[in-house]
Amino acid sequence: MQTTNIATRLKMKILARYKVVHLSHFKQSESKLFVANQWGIPFGLISFNFPFCSFSDTYLGGCVPIIAFVFLQIALITFLLFTVKKKNKVQKQLKGSEEKYRQMFNSLSVGFGLYELVLDDNGQPVDYIIRDANLQLLKARNMSFEDVINKRGSEVFEYCTDKWKEKIAKVALTGGVGKSIEYVHSQDKYYELHAYSPQLNFFAVIYNDITENEKAKADLLTQKSRIEGILKGTNAGTWDWDIQGSTFVVNARWAQIVGHTPEDLESATEATIFELVAQEDRKKVDETIARVFAKELDYFDLEFRMIQKGGQYVWVHSRSSIVEWDAEGKPLRMMGTCLDITDRKEVSIALAESEKRFKAIFDKSKTVMYIVDPQTTKMVDINNTGANFYGYSKESLLGISMDKINILSHDEIAHEMNLARLENKSVFKFKHRLASGHIRNVNVIASPLTVNNKDFLHCIVIDTTNAVEAAYKLKRINRRFVGINHIVHYKAASISDLLDFTLKESIEFTNSDFGAVYHCDSENGIFCLNNWSQNVNLTHPYQSYTQGLNNMDCLNKALRSKETVIENNPTQYYPFQTPESVNGDLFKSITLPVVVNNKVEALFWLATKNFSYSKFHVRQLMLLLDTAWIIVEKERMKG
């Protein structure tokens, strides 16, 4: 029995072994403790199998190693369970961290790619493999993750081998950093590339889309070129004033304007520049700058004089603005342009002086002058003499249409002004109406005048009323003598015939429209018509002596007063002036009595609607009638 037990134990030691199998191959029939010849201990995905002897063969010395081994296996299992649990937790944390960083990696606003160099047998880079790329880079390339990962760059991108080798490949080989700008023609975009090497033969690239910046630069360069072209075309100088630093930077043209070379003003200070401003203009320059600094003005825009190197004055037009302010609102920088306007300014000053002299002559002249717009016929200026002549205030005449003072219609006046504007006519004869209502005969001398590219007429007015009246009187006097001569030499058939001829001469002398000669029949109390130039009434009764003189008609007035009666403002028809015979018009009239021995023998009556009768007509007509009546008396004496 003892020999059998020793043999059995020896067999078990010889056959003892360590087996590792997957949990899926573990058999429940082998796991019965102290029944089978081996004991299986499952753990995770592995199990351990050990041979045992039967309890029937055990003794005290054999039980101790078995118990110790059991405890050893329990401790090992506990340790393995703890290690696996800790490993799973770490793996879970690593997976979460990796997902977190992958999310952050993909959310970057710039593109990112990781690449591995492909070297030839000589260790020279010939290509690269794309190992990783974030979503921004894939989106910019319009590709998916599967399209690029673990693929060669030559398979994915069109690129210049020499270019990437020179700028990027050496970064992976040397571990340095690189920077370049790449233009992708198919996308019309610019990218700024920052490359670095995370480890040997690897390089990572950050792609920053700088398209807007690059295009803005290009636009800025274009704008700068355009501005430089404009400045060159306008021959303008430029200046840049660092207000806090009290320094000026000027271009060559600015220096040339003030008679200096660019080298003379290379380190110009504020004091140097302002010393070039003419002393007479320094105050207005300082005041304007102060208003710009105080933000009362948006721009500095001023014409002033500067002193050239030789001491001569040069007129400049400078325009500028503040381009930079500090946080407290104080000006830091001012930039502007400067134009040489000497020639234009001198012409402008000369013109202003000429206009000033003309204005003085215009306003103080004793001749009536006014300026009118030929397009609107409105008066734009008039001198004091003119205002006094027309009887209006100067202010009330400005802006009025000329038909207020000229008796012609608006269209007739515009036509005459157009002739003057085209210089087809320069002297005009008009009748102008004064504020009092009186009509004056005037000669208007009109000359074209251009001010600020607008046409006007400068008019000189000469009052010819007295001259016209004198000429008229002279003409009438001459006509009277002609009439007297005609009457004296007229071979009259009778007294009535002579009176008729005298009436005809009187009408022609006064340019009247018609007239009549009446004999006064005092016995019958009527006026007997001797002759009438128109077919109207033959007789007219004396008016009652009881009526007032002012209420009588012109014939009765002349009969009672034995003086000439003039009616230039008729208000009623005369009894012998029927509307049917004169088309309904009210005529002005003059009635002249022929008085012999303090008795009215006859009445001459003349009428017109074209002019007013005056005392001149009375004197001339009386001489004509007196001559005729002398001849009548001679004829009566003969008879």
Image (cartoon, helix red, strand yellow):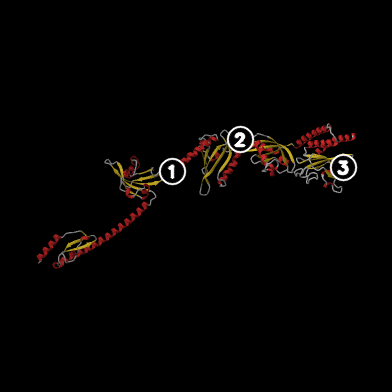
Q: Secondary structure at mark 2?
A: helix
Horizontal arrangement in the rendering, residue 528 relative to residue 302 (left or right): right
Marks 2 and 1 sit apart, C-alpha to C-alpha, by: 47 Å
Horizontal arrangement in the rendering, residue 272 relative to residue 152 (left or right): right
Q: Earlier in the sequence, mark 1 or mark 3?
A: 1
* Disc 2 target residue: 347
Q: Earlier in the sequence, mark 2 or mark 3?
A: 2
User: Looking at the image, which is closer to me, 259 or 430?
Assistant: 430
* Disc 3 target residue: 521
Q: Residue 464, how many percent across, how many down? A: 74, 36
Asked if the residue at tag 1 contacts the one at tag 2, i.e. Cβ–Cβ closer than 8 Å, the answer is no
Marks 2 and 3 sit apart, C-alpha to C-alpha, by: 85 Å
Q: Quadrant of residue 542?
A: top right
**Image quarter hosting the C terminus:** top right
Q: Secondary structure at mark 1?
A: helix
* Disc 1 target residue: 215
Q: Earlier in the sequence, mark 2 or mark 1?
A: 1
Q: Residue 325, how many percent across, how many down? A: 51, 47
Q: Quadrant of residue 384?
A: top right
Front tag of 1 and 3:
3
Q: Residue 404, how many percent across, how many down? A: 70, 43
Residue at image location 29% in from the left, 59% down from the top: 86
| Amino acid type indicated by mark 2 | Val
